[in-house]
Amino acid sequence: MKQFIFLIVAIFSINCTGIAQQETKKEKKTYAVSKTNAEWKKILTSDQYYILRQAGTERPFSSILNKVYDKGVFHCAGCNTPLYESKHKFDSGTGWPSFDRAVEGNIEKDVDHKLGYARNELLCNTCGGHLGHVFNDGPRETTGMRHCINGDALVFVPKEPKNE
């Protein structure tokens, strides 16, 4: 009888472990711009690599892009995809560049559990680079969203003045 109970417990344990592993496995997405880690390290600075490829976070108030409000577009530092228009940038007081919306279709949302709870992570939809996170404490008069983005994940491309 003891052997039978042991057998039942062993089968149940193996079955539960297999199901749990299946549920946590995530299919890896293929991006239009895909490189090896060595290739990314050649084209990115060490800070850009840490943020974009290792999902790091820069220190607050450390990015020069935090106070850039000129007309233009913020692009992904990894693949040059346009991500945020400067007209949607606002000062959140958090120390990171903040936007109330992205260029449509160029940002991907994922769930990040790195701090022990779920956060909505933002990725470049072209190269999969980690940009930051999205929160629902943005300007109420617009979208109510705050895209909190690492400045080292971005490159600012100023709008060229029109010759009239």
Image: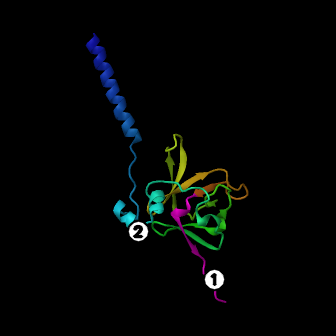
Q: Quadrant of the C terminus?
A: bottom right
Q: Residue drawn 57% across and 58% down?
A: 149
Farthest top residue in view: 1
Task: Look at label 1 and name its amino acid.
Answer: Pro
- Depth check, front residue: 97 or 143: 97
Query: Is 127 located above or below residue 159 in the figure?
Result: above
> Would you say residue 122 sits in the magenta stretch?
no
Q: Residue 61: image x %, image y %?
A: 62, 59
- Say which residue label 2 marks: 43
Q: Residue drawn 50% across and 47% down?
A: 112
Farthest left residue in view: 3
Query: Is 16 located above or below residue 67 in the figure?
Result: above
Residues at discs 2 and 1 in contact (Cβ within 8 Å): no
Task: Look at label 2 and name its amino acid.
Answer: Ile
Crowding at dot 2, Cα within 10 Å, few <14 / some 14-19 / many 20+, comes out as few
Q: Residue 139: image x %, image y %?
A: 70, 56
Give the secondary structure at mark 1: loop
Query: Is 4 located above or below residue 25 in the figure?
Result: above
Q: Which residues are magenta?
A: 149-164
Mark closer to the observer (2, 1)? 2
Crowding at dot 1, Cα within 10 Å, few <14 / some 14-19 / many 20+, comes out as few
Q: Earlier in the sequence, mark 2 or mark 1?
A: 2
Q: Residue 153: image x %, image y %?
A: 51, 62
Give the secondary structure at mark 2: helix
- Depth check, front residue: 112 or 151: 151
- Say which residue label 1 marks: 161
